Image (cartoon, rainbow, N blue to C red):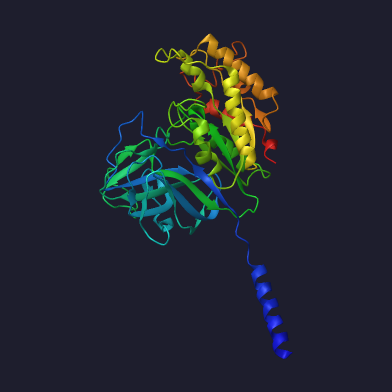
Amino acid sequence: MRLRTAFLMMVCVSAGVAQSKPEAGPWVGTWAASPFDGDPWHQIPTLVDSTLREIVHTSIGGNAVRVHLTNEFGKEPLRVDAVTIAVSSGTSSVDAATLHNLRFGNSPSIVIPPGAEAVSDPVVMPVPAAANLAVSFYLPLQQVSNVTVHSSAQQDNFIATGNHVRDASFTEPVVTPSWFFLKGVDVQASDANAASVVTFGDSITDGALSTQNANHRWPDFFAARLKGNSATAHLSVLDQGIGGNCILIHCVGQNALARFDRDVLAQAGVKYMIVLEGINDIGHLHSPNQPDYKLTAQDLEQGLMQLVARAHVHGIKVFGATLTPYKGAGYFTEQGEQIREALNQWILTSGVFDGTIDFDKATRDTVNPQAFSAQADGGDHLHPKDPGYQIMADSIDLSLFR
């Protein structure tokens, strides 16, 4: 009887100790980029026997971190011999006090098969919100005949010959505007309700024409608004835009329907999605190289309905965003404009989405509504620049994210 009583007391004490420990929060993506096959806009630098130091901007903070590397479009296995993460202190420099080695299955190296990605082991590290992190990884000499990349990232990244993953800075590195082989960064959030918002789209979501290294894409401005509002500060923003991407056809990167599982459903902690896509499908009506290309608003509506249906299977709420004006852009046509206007009307009135965001109304000129306002126009009449991206972010009703 005494032994049984003592055992019960030990159980109660143990339970009390366990209950006093703070519970770990969920894993949530704090940064992500959509990879694709090759780089259509930039010459690919030498990547083997090199350290790649790539800079990413967090949306929410956390107590631990893990990194996603990708070889999803590679033709050979990709060997990575060493990886570190640290807080960036500008250009290729890092805060040495924050430098941590990353491991994969408790090994410092990993071979990623073609078509696969790799997730690092978690490392305990305070990760600030709205901060720049530097992920550095060394690729030894090997055959790399096809890269997995997110190019035109509006962010300088750095390459140095040899293994320099633990160096505080690089000496005369090659500067590249692309993220190679880096797909995402997750944090273990302290808030049990932490979740992510995926912004899914094309170059406008990717931040084309925004200021280099400034994090002035509309998803960045949106993340800052979420962080500044106590009711939404637990939400991260994952920018899954690809410049030149289409919903239905192969433009740049796989079409939205094809990449949806990888770029949306596979992200950590996804609760919401904003979709802004279709202007490039419309723009291809202008291409003389595609005389047989046909498109209707109903085609795009069907594609968007497929995205909504697939997201709802996984409990993700989807907010449809209207396509922004593009009169004056190189591939503007009256036929395309009719499709854009019909699609926007359908987005706002169909009831297919869990909510809507009227980027068209926010950015259009009041006198000439088929074109951007002077404040929003980035100069090519297709993309905003920083003030236009701020206008877009400011137009989003935060009460959607309850």
Task: Decide: is 170 above or below 38.
Answer: below
Residue 217 showing in the rendered view: no
**Quarter of the figure with the N terminus:** bottom right
Residue 304, percent from left and from top: 59, 28
- From the viewer's perspective, tell me whether residue 225 is left or right of residue 142: right
**Quarter of the figure with the C terminus:** top right
Q: Quadrant of residue 16?
A: bottom right
Closer to the camera in the image, 358 or 111: 111
Q: Quadrant of residue 244?
A: top left
Figure disc tally? 0
Closer to the camera in the image, 334 or 231: 334
Q: Residue at x 72, y 90 (%)?
A: 2
Task: Decide: is 306 above or below 21.
Answer: above
- From the viewer's perspective, tell me whether residue 196 is left or right of residue 107: right
Closer to the camera in the image, 315 or 13: 315
Q: Residue at x 30, y 52 (%)?
A: 164
Residue 353, percent from left and from top: 67, 31
Task: Decide: is 106 above or below 56.
Answer: below
